[in-house]
Image (spheres, rainbow, N blue to C red):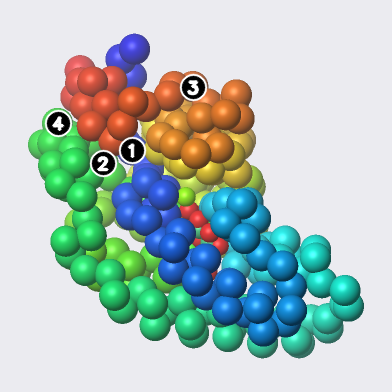
Amino acid sequence: MKLEEKAVIFDLDGVICFTDKYHYQAWKALADKLGIYFDEKINNRLRGVSRMASLEIILERADKTYTQEEKEAFAEEKNDNYKELLKNMKESDLSEEVKTTLEELRARGYLLAIGSSSKNTKFILGQLGLGDFFDAIADGTDITHSKPDPEVFLKAAEKLGMKPEDCAVVEDAKAGIEAAKAANMTALALDGDARDCGMQDYNLEGFFDLLNILPGAGE
Ligand code: B16
Ligand code: MG
């Protein structure tokens, strides 16, 4: 398959980098404190889902209900803990495969953007040495509706000045593939439940496979 798209929008967590273990540690600390069962399988359901929606998934197993104020305090506590853990991320956490593929796509003339649910996107990109790399960033701070709503990808396309149909999206989560299709974009599944959801246009063999299907933005 060869695509004719002119721009590529990347999900962040699970595509450019891997923060799952930090999300897991921070949510686990909160769940343990509240006496709620939480494991890595439940953590998988949080991929691509917003912070408050993630909390609601964890609270499904709580034996009491919490007020909105309490929930916001829980989310803030988790995020403070998570941000401390993110300080461990460094430039060497960006894989050579991701780095060289991104550089080659840029050399081939593609516009490159991030479309992430995370409100910590800019901090994470900075830690990875990608603070100034992307042509546009749309993240959790730009949107009111999280994936599977298409808002974050439509916002990224708008910031790039591109039509949705000229954008391909790279995602690891089902919610992200659904969002890409709802945005009328080409959905490329990299991993995880994105590959199992049946809504994607193409399964990537790995990040480098982008170079096989994206021959050049002007071609
Ligand atoms: P934050 P993505 C998502 O990022 C994560 O996959 C998801 O697990 C997390 O809950 C969400 O960001 C919000 O993150 O708490 O940092 O705002 O996959 O859309 O890049
Ligand atoms: Mg993701």
* SS under mark 4: loop
Furthest residue toward top: 1
User: Do the numbered discs 3 and 1 sit on residues whose CB atoms are within 8 Å?
Assistant: no
**Mark 2 vs ligand 1: CB below 8 Å:** no
Q: Is residue 144 visible?
A: no
Q: Amino acid at mark 2?
A: Leu
Q: Which mark is residue 111?
A: 2
Which of 119 and 5 lies nearest the eye of the viewer? Answer: 119
As displayed, is residue 154 above or below residue 110? Answer: below
Residue drawn 30% across and 15% down? 2
The kind of residue tagged 4 is Arg
Q: CA distance from mark 3 to mark 1?
A: 14 Å
Provide the residue designation for mark 1: 8
Q: Is residue 53 above or below residue 177?
A: below
Q: Earlier in the sequence, mark 2 or mark 1?
A: 1
Mark 3 or mark 2: whose residue is earlier in sequence = 2
Give me the C-alpha separation between circle 2 and circle 1. 6 Å
Hey, which quadrant is residue 55 in on the image? bottom right
The quarter in which the C terminus is drawn is top left
Quickly name the residue at label 3: 201
Of the two numbered discs 3 and 1 on the same chain, state the one appearing first in sequence: 1
Nearer-N-terminus badge (3/4): 4
Residue drawn at x 31%, y 78% is 87
Q: Which residue is mark 4?
A: 108
